[in-house]
């Protein structure tokens, strides 16, 4: 897989030249308002490195996203295999993060829909999503995508300080309509 294309976006493998705009996005307090804090350049580079390694290992990860018109980097959207230390492991998670000047254009939903189609194309049976309970914009995207709330899977994020307003997380699930019921987790 080299890229996934939508009407307005291209989801693709990460390239070295993505490090700078990715770091700028991750350092933006507005973009990171539902995370404990913006990322330092070193933290952003480590995240980039993990995504490149995940793509090499799994054949997918959160993809870099460009606008088709002009090829401008606008964020990340895609699916990734949760690691052993992730809440709700084992599962494949869907996620998105976009630069603030493209918010409210439907990009997250558009790219996530293509990511869901890709997940079904590669034979995944189910996708999981989660977000901070305070993150109403992402909750609206999950609803638009048809994810069901999975309240039994809600959790306090273990990598967020106890008592922090962002620690409570809500979980969502979406089953592949072309597959049998997903296995019990």
Image (spheres, helix red, strand yellow):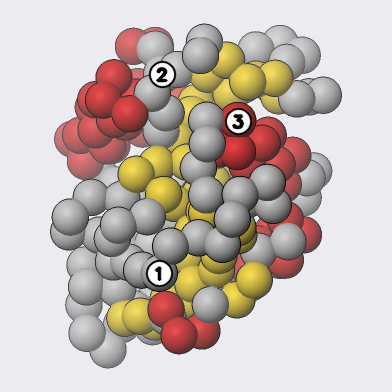
Identity of the residue drawn at 65% across and 12% down: 71
* Quadrant position of residue 21: top left
**Front-most of 173 and 64?**
173
Neighbour class for label 1 at 10 Å: few (<14), some, many (≥20)?
A: few
Q: Secondary structure at mark 1?
A: loop
> What x and y, as percent, mark residue 76?
51, 35
Neighbour class for label 2 at 10 Å: few (<14), some, many (≥20)?
A: some
Position above or below: 36 against 69: below
Q: Residue 55's mark?
A: none
Nearer the observer: mark 2 or 1; the answer is 1
Q: Secondary structure at mark 3?
A: helix
- The span from disc 3 to disc 1 (Cα, nearest Å) is 22 Å
> What x and y, as percent, mark residue 117?
66, 36
Nearer the observer: mark 3 or 2; the answer is 3
According to the image, label 3 marks what residue? 121
According to the image, label 2 marks what residue? 14
Does residue 101 show up? no
Neighbour class for label 3 at 10 Å: few (<14), some, many (≥20)?
A: few
According to the image, label 1 marks what residue? 184
Residues at badges 3 and 1 in contact (C-beta under 8 Å)?
no
Does residue 143 show up? yes
**Front-most of 26 and 123?**
123
Position above or below: 132 against 25: below
Q: Secondary structure at mark 2?
A: loop
Is tag 2's residue or tag 1's residue first in the polypeptide sequence? 2
Identity of the residue drawn at 51% across and 14% down: 1
Identity of the residue drawn at 17% across and 59% down: 85
Tell me if 182 is positioned left or right of 39 in this view.
Answer: right
């Amino acid at each position: 897989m080299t890229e996934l294309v939508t009407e307005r976006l291209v989801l693709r493998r990460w390239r070295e030249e993505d490090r700078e705009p990715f770091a700028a996005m991750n350092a933006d307090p507005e973009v990171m308002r539902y995370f404990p804090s913006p990322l330092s350049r070193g933290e952003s580079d480590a995240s980039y490195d993990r995504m490149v390694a995940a793509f090499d290992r799994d054949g997918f990860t959160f993809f870099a996203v460009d606008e088709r018109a002009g090829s401008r980097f606008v964020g990340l959207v895609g699916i990734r295999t949760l690691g052993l230390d992730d809440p709700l492991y084992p599962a494949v998670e869907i996620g998105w993060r976009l630069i603030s000047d493209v918010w409210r254009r439907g990009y997250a939903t558009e790219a996530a829909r293509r990511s869901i189609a890709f997940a079904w194309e590669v034979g995944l049976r189910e996708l999981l999503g989660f977000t901070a309970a305070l993150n109403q914009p992402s909750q609206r995207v999950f609803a638009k995508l048809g994810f069901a709330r999975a309240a039994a899977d809600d959790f306090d994020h273990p990598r967020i300080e106890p008592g922090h307003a962002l620690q409570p997380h809500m979980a969502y699930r979406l089953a592949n309509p072309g597959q049998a019921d997903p296995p019990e987790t």
